[in-house]
Image (cartoon, rainbow, N blue to C red):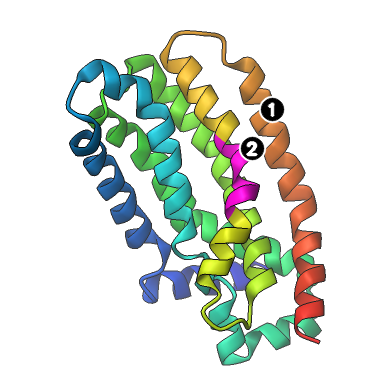
Amino acid sequence: MRALLLRDLRLALRAGGGFGLGLAFFLIVVMLVPFSVGPEAQLLQAIAPGVLWLGALLACLLSLDRLLALDLEDGSLELLLTAPLPLEGALAVKALAHWLTTGLPLVLAAPFLGVMLQLAAPGHLWLLISLALGTPALSVIGTFGAALTVGIKRGGLLLSLLVLPLYIPTLIFGAEVARRGAAGLDASTPLLMLAGLTLAVVALMPFAAAAVLRMGLR
């Protein structure tokens, strides 16, 4: 599992995977918002949690179509099916690699980009916490979507259509945590819901992804 994780990290960095691309997209989204809604500080402060969460969610989508496609092209995906390592474990490792190269940089960059949207000072910590809890679920759900569409030509659009509805609960609770934290309100309820949702996704989705991948490659 360690060797597979290191391999995926090297491939993601060498191929110009999610690291720089996701951060650049996130930055562009945040920069464009003031141009579209105006520079009013109160308006930007009100929409900042939702915009930051939506930008992070869309940035996670950018590299999902290559999550399993590269392995299918070079034949390593078929080797994973016959390897001693359970396929569920291999897919969980791939989701972890995706989060480390895409989700984690977004988590660390979000508080700094929040300054551009006039996010209230108490909201920066809550934004960081909510993204740290929620983005792993985005990567695992994305792995499930990649397993569903692997081998389909031009499956990137289909992948987005399949994954985005599954992202909605994470987006709702994550943005609510950041919004309540920025407003100085109690954020414990949406935070617990977000944590429970992420734990359920991490526990169950690798098995679902492995099942659909086995059926798709028969």
Q: Secondary structure at mark 1?
A: helix
Residue situated in front as seen by the camera: 189 or 93: 189
- 10 vs 44, left or right, is right
Above or below, 157 against 101 in this view is below
Q: Which secondary structure, mark 2? A: helix
**What residue range appears in magenta?**
164-171
Residue placed most toward the observer, 179 or 75:
179
Residue 216's image quarter?
Answer: bottom right
Q: Position of residue 29 (x, y in %)?
A: 30, 46
Q: Does the magenta run of residues contain 92?
A: no
Q: Residue at x 34, y 41 (%)?
A: 109
Q: How many residues crowd around disc 1 within 10 Å: few (fewer than 14), some, or many (20 or more)?
A: some
Find residue 44 and report its horizontal and vertical position in percent: 28, 24
The numbered disc on residue 169 is 2
Hey, what amino acid is under mark 2? Pro
**What residue sits 57% from the left and 60% below the top?**
161
Give the spatial CA distance, label 2 vs label 1.
Answer: 9 Å
Q: Is 169 in the magenta? A: yes
For label 1, the residue is 193
Q: Quadrant of residue 90?
A: bottom right
In the image, 77 versus 30, the foreground residue is: 30
Dot label at residue 85? none
Q: Quadrant of the C terminus?
A: bottom right
- In this view, the mark in front (2 or 1): 2
Q: Position of residue 165 (x, y in %)?
A: 62, 49
Asked if the residue under mark 1 is in contact with the one under mark 2, i.e. CB atoms within 8 Å, the reply is no
Kind of residue indicated by mark 1: Met
> Is most of the magenta stretch helix, strand or loop?
helix
Where residue 182 sits, quadrant-wise, is: top left
